[in-house]
Image: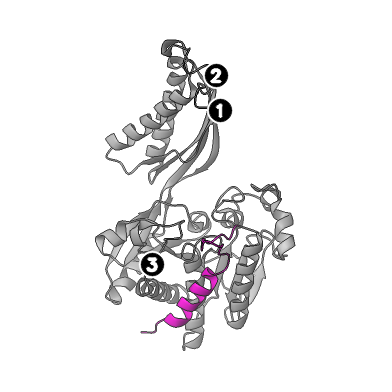
Amino acid sequence: MIAIDAQRLLGHIHELGAVGRDSEGRLIRLAASDTDKQGRDLFVGWLRQAGLDIAVDRVGNIFGIWQSLENAGQAPLLIGSHIDAGIYDGCYGVLAGLEVIETLKASVFSPSRPIAVAAFTNEEGVRYTPDMMGSLVHAGGIDAETVLAAVGTDGRVLGQELARIGYAGDREPGFLKPHAYLELHIEQGPVLEREGVPIGAVENLQGISWQRVTIDGVANHAGTTPMSMRSDAGHAAVRVITFLLDRVQASNAPTVATVGTIRFEPNAINVIPSRAVFTIDLRDPDEQRLQAEEAALAAYLEQLALTEKVTVSVEQLARFEPVIFDISIVERIETAAKDRGLGVKRMTSGAGHDSQMMARIAPAAMIFVPSAGGISHSPHEHTGDAELVAGANILLDVAAQLAK
């Protein structure tokens, strides 16, 4: 049984993980930024060293393709993720994909179809929205011109920024039609670590509903306005948060609800808020339950407007249906883990991933490895070397099967 080169994989992870560190050690590599360019340049250099064909599409998605004259006409196996994140989040899956190709190239393995590794643009959606942008374009879920015109949080246009950093490619998004798609990722949650299981076989991915709620009331003096005569946008916002928490805690379903941002106006200690603006993140792996939660929230907001004497408006920011991954690939992941003597658990992904988009156009599945403390999107994000290597070897085994 062949195995990946652990030293090479870990070296790549830590070298890329050093790109974009600030003075406090935080890793900041936002899409199409100068530090993103540095990370991309390093990755492309490794693709070149591995002897892969390199392609970049118009939205900056990078592909390293291993193909031969014998299999060039076949749909490729695609392994992918993103590099606009932490040392492990996204980057691990991309670099493990490269490592799989290098390991198979160095062995006697002869794939019957090409194998490619992809680094998709702007998965995180921090500087530009929507998130999972590059894979969404590749899967045909949004057109390239729309995302190239996207304006970032700093006022800069994505298409112009990609050109500036040298990654406005010439290939049309979606040019590569995969036979199947695999993604290896850290869990970004506590389940595997808590249960002592080294490998997660991800069978589905939660649906996501993002909304921005604006509540308008009337600003007035905090001391002179009786409680019964107020139109308090802040109090109304808190009631929504409490409603969401009470509802999901009373349910036996895996629904989760998060109010991640909130802003009051005029935001003064002695003034009743005239406006509250906040975001709601609803997730559930079942589409019917997710729709039911959205409907319950809408009904509550309608009633709240009457009881609190406020005006409520809602903007849908993003909406993705749950994804059911290909059962045959999930079973291959389970078998590969057992063949290497590793425990494995079928799981739901609570976070969105590029595989969510790629599943629209090809059979897809994900492999998880544990996250220490369930922490990600943080300088404290960590996965042990042995766990990283184990996950990459499962990716290797499944990729070899799918490429035959």
Identified at 27% across, 59% down, the residue is 194
Q: Earlier in the sequence, mark 1 or mark 3?
A: 1
| Left or right relative to 109: residue 44 | right
| Left or right relative to 127: residue 112 | left
Which percent across, then down, holds residue 336? 33, 73
Q: Is residue 242 above or below residue 39?
A: above
Which percent across, then down, holds residue 339? 29, 76
- Identity of the amino acid at label 3? Thr
Which percent across, then down, holds residue 186? 41, 63
Task: Report if the CB atoms under discs 1 and 3 are less than 8 Å apart.
Answer: no
- Identity of the amino acid at label 1? Glu
Identified at 40% across, 51% down, the residue is 350
Give the residue at mark 2: 219
Between circles 1 and 3, the one closer to the viewer is 1
Question: What are the residue bounds of the magenta stretch?
Answer: 1-30
Give the residue at mark 1: 265
Task: Give the SS element for disc 2.
Answer: loop
Give the overall secondary structure of the magenta segment. Answer: loop
Which percent across, then down, holds residue 241? 40, 32
Which numbered circle lies on residue 383?
3
Q: Is residue 106 above or below residue 133?
A: below
Task: Report if the CB atoms under discs 1 and 2 are less than 8 Å apart.
Answer: yes
